[in-house]
Structures are given as C-alpha cells and as structure tokens.
Image (tube, grey):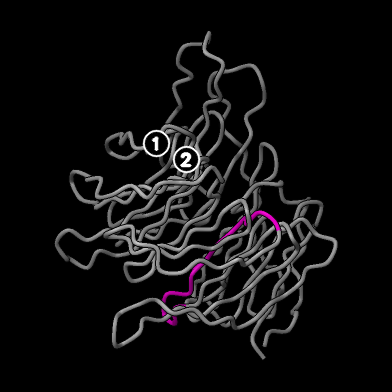
Amino acid sequence: MFRRERSIPLRGSAAALCNNLSVLQLPVRNLTHFGVVHGPSAQLLSAAPEGVPLAQRQLQAKEGAGVSPPLITQVHWCVLPFRVLLVLTSHRGIQMYESDGSVMVYWHALDAGDASLVQAVFARGIAASGHFICVAKGSNIVLSEELAGHQTPVTDIATEPAQGQDCIADVVTADDSGLLCVWRSGPEFKLLTRIPGFGVPCPSVQLWQGTIAAGYGNGQVRLYEASTGTLHVQIDAHARAICALDLAPEVGKLLSAAEDTFVHIWKLSRSPEGGYVEVEHCHGECVPDTQVCGARFCDPSGSSFAVTGYDLAEILRFSSM
C-alpha cells in the first residue's frame, strides 16, 4: 500500500504531454531532482526526502530557426557511465545540459527540411544506452548516426544495459502506429526485429530483463519478448489512453499511468519452469479530477512514485506504508 506524501509545488501546470515527468535520485546528497515541461520552458526542482523543495531552475527552449515560439516536448536525465546529462527536446532541436541545468554542453538543431511539405518536425523520446544518448526526431532516431526504422513519428525510447552479451536487444523504440522496433546498440546500431502495431499509438515503452513493456492508446499494457517479438501478456490495465510507464529495475515493478486518472503498479517476474513472464497487480491509486500526464518511480526499489497532471500546479508524491 502507498500513502500520499507532501506535494512539491510547481510554478505552473505541467503540459498535457505523455511522459511529462523525469526523476533523478541522488542518494549521496539525499536529494531527488524532478523535471516537468510546459510550453517553451522546463521546470527543474530539487527536493529533500520529506518533499521540501530546496531549489528551482527554469530552462528555456533554444530559439533556432523559425518564426513561432519553440515548444519543449520532453525533459529527461540520461545516466551515462561517467556522467549524467539533462536533455531537452523541442520543435527546434535537442539541448543537453549538465545534470543541474547550469551549463548547456551541446545543441543539435533540427533540419526543418522542405518548407513546402506539410509535416511537423520535432524531437521526442530520450534514453541513454551505454555511452550513447538516443533521441527521436520525427520518424528517425538521432544518435552518432541516424537510424531509419519508423514510418510514423516516434513516441518513446527505452534502453537497458546490454551487459556484454552477444545479439542482446537493449534498445526499443515505439511510434504513433504502435510499431515497436528492437535494436542492439553499439558502434553500429542493428535493427533486430519489428513488432507490428495494430492501429493504436504506443506513447510509452520500457525494457526489463529482455522483456518489453508497451503502453497503448487503448489502455492496454502488452509484454513482449524483446529478442523475438513474442507476446507474453496482454493486460487491459486502463479505461483510457496510457500516458506513462516506468520500471523499478531492482524489483521488477512496473508503473502505468493513464488518462483515466489511475496509476497502477504491477510486479513482473519470470516463471522458473518455462521462463514465461508473470504479472501480479500490486496497487492502484486514483488521482481524482486530474488529467495525468506523467508518472515515475522515485527510487530503483519502487517504494515511492510521483505523478504530474495537466492544470495541476504541483507534483504529487506517494510512498509505501
């Protein structure tokens, strides 16, 4: 069971975007960083364990080329082997900062392409894989190279450590058609398999021990074998579109949040006999009268989580009793 803790105030509402919350825990300093976006700005907050806000910083989207104000689409901390970077994506480009947002260390402008084409150009979907930072740009993934795997805009990217195994599937990308592309990272990324969509967007995706957890616009959570694309489990988890998934890797807990105002926590495990993925529902939390747009675990053990909502000027926090 979880109980409501002290909320963290925001300067304004979170934007109505999927995956609109990022969390970075700093155990050495006994701090937790939170990141939320709205319009052309991102709010960064640091809080003590009891929820007392200690510092706030606001970052603006870099203008780049164009006449309309740029809109930030996502903020995410990327934990690399020897460094932590804060990454912002927008309609103009990709901005990378030191972990506290104090110094911008890299800027990648998006190419608007042929202005006569009626299409939007934006970046959305951020993840770290080894020494690489993966960011989705429209229907491609921008890395040290560009990988063309999707025909519709990419919605999310998830990774997990490859641990030196051969032919391991350690990166998965999702798009607006529900298609999942599974990759092996390295000096040259390799597309291993495609898991077909079924006409429903997949706004959020996660990877855990070779299992893909995908959340869809019809409220379903589906668990696939990453290496083969085999469907293990289909859960009718929510009554409306899922807006966020997260994993607590130490214990195999999966968090799902949706526009039906509910946040659910599931326990994933593998059967020792056949190796099949098993799912157990652990907790359900209603956030009444709120369009939930982001939810994240606040620690690797899944003992606490945070939730953001549109038109909600605070980050809601919950911890296990």
Other residues around mark 2 within 10 Å, as few (<14) / some (14–19) / many (≥20):
many
Residue sitting at x 77%, y 55%: 291
The residue that label 2 is drawn on is 154
Q: Is residue 250 covered in magenta?
A: yes
Query: Which label sits on residue 46?
Result: none
Residue sitting at x 52%, y 40%: 176
- Residue type of the residue flagged with mark 1: His
Q: Position of residue 241 (x, y in %)?
A: 66, 54
Name the side, left or right, on which 45 lies relative to 144.
Answer: right
- 28 or 240: nearer the viewer: 240
The residue that label 1 is drawn on is 150
Q: Quadrant of the C terminus?
A: bottom right
- Residue type of the residue flagged with mark 2: Val
Secondary structure, mark 1, is: loop
Q: Which residues are magenta?
A: 240-252
- 233 or 255: nearer the viewer: 233
Question: In the rendered image, which quarter is residue 137 located in?
Answer: top left
- 167 or 308: nearer the viewer: 167
